Image: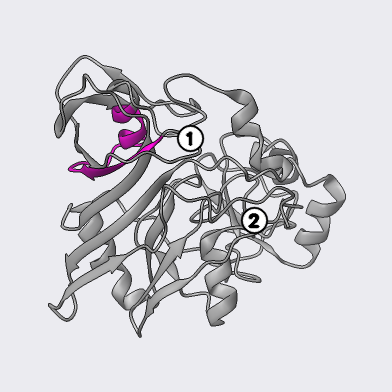
Amino acid sequence: MGRRRRSSPLPPRHGVDATRVVLRTTDELLIDALRRAPALSDLDEAGLLARFAAREIVDLSGSPLDPSTPTTPGAPVYLYRDLPVEVAIPFDLPVLHADDDIIVVDKPHFLATMPRGVHVVETALVRLRREFGTDLISPAHRLDRLTAGVLLFTRRPQARRDYQALFADRLVQKEYRAAAPVRTDLRLPADVENRILKDSGDLRARVVDGEVNARSRVELLDASSDATAGLAEYRLTPHTGRTHQLRLHMAGLGIPIDGDPLYPEVRAELAARPDSGDFTRPLRLVAHRLEFDDPLTGRRRVFCSTRSVLSEDEVSEDGV
């Protein structure tokens, strides 16, 4: 596992963690550096000064900073941002299991795992922190915002490392379900192996030459098609965890997952729908099953989603 980032010196507020900004400039006043930070584009000078006055802009040790403090390149600064105005995600977040160590949910499509960019409150993490009344909840792994299904969170810091290690060390057996077209000339099951890279800032991953780092098994599970869309159900088993791996592998086989706005080509209109409150075209990909040996109890754990990729149980025409 990579080096673990130190926890924020500011506690979460309303279920949302404080923002961490790493300064990159030198010979500049802190107030000027923060005004130009892309992550704080929603804050004006008055908003920043108010936070300085409230002693809510602090360094890694939690010591309040002054707006005239000279910047130190590479030093993190922490502060609270105003919560953005977000499009409400009109779907429930069912809890499949909860105990003293973990919470397992059946995440709906369109709901992000944790705050990122414009999605802050409308995320599974913030919903759970508010529902359970504790800011100690943390995701053990992630699902893409457009992907639904089984998602595991830890409930206390003492358990976090053990459960996160399960996913980092690939000790969790995962099974996904997807709805996609049928190709009569495609022999299945098929094992797909290639090398996938994704550059920071690029929406899409891509297949490149080189050592294999992405492996998936694709099986046709239900050949009877969806009456409305001509789709069949597939079982997808990832043996690695590259970003967009299953979506890219399905598109490479000529059977792209229904509702995918990125593969095999970008469909900007489809990608923009959720942000305008249109949830009628979900990506029909569900994390159907997680199975693992519990690192704390040794028990075999199996959690399954109740969502079907061939139904439209999460379709909303007006976003309410």
Answer left or right for 27 relative to 192: right
Residue 24 picture location, percent across and down: 56, 35
Q: Residue furthest top?
A: 209
Q: Which residues are magenta?
A: 231-250
Residue 27, visible in the rendered structure = no
Residue 7 location (% of width, % of height): 45, 63
Q: Residue furthest right?
A: 46
For image coordinates 38% across by 28% down, the residue present is: 256
Indicate left or right for 204 with 73 as reference.
Answer: left
Q: CA distance from mark 2 to mark 1?
A: 24 Å
Asked which quadrant contains residue 14, the reply is bottom right
How many residues crowd mark 1 within 10 Å: few (<14), some (14–19), many (20+)? few
Secondary structure of the residue carrying tag 1 is loop
Apparent side of residue 241 relative to residue 96 in the rendered image (left or right): left
Which one is nearer the viewer's eye here, 173 or 100?
Answer: 173
Tell me the crowding category of disc 2: few under 14, some 14 to 19, or many 20 or more residues within 10 angstroms, Cα based. Answer: many
Q: Amino acid at mark 1?
A: Ala
Asked if the magenta segment contains residue 312, the reply would be no
Q: Nearer the viewer, residue 86 or 248?
A: 248
The residue under label 2 is 89
Answer whether residue 244 is magenta in the image.
yes
Residue at the image position 49 percent from the left and 42 percent from the top: 74
Query: In terms of sequence position, does the residue under pointer 2 or pointer 1 come before the other?
Result: 2
Measured from the top left, where is residue 274 in percent x and y? 65, 42
The image shows residue 91, relative to residue 31, as above or below, that is below
Check if mark 2's residue and mark 1's residue have beta carbons within 8 Å. no
Q: Which residue is mark 1?
A: 229
Q: Residue at x 57, y 78 (%)?
A: 131
- The local secondary structure at tag 2 comes to loop
User: Can residue 144 be seen at all in this image of the molecule?
Assistant: yes
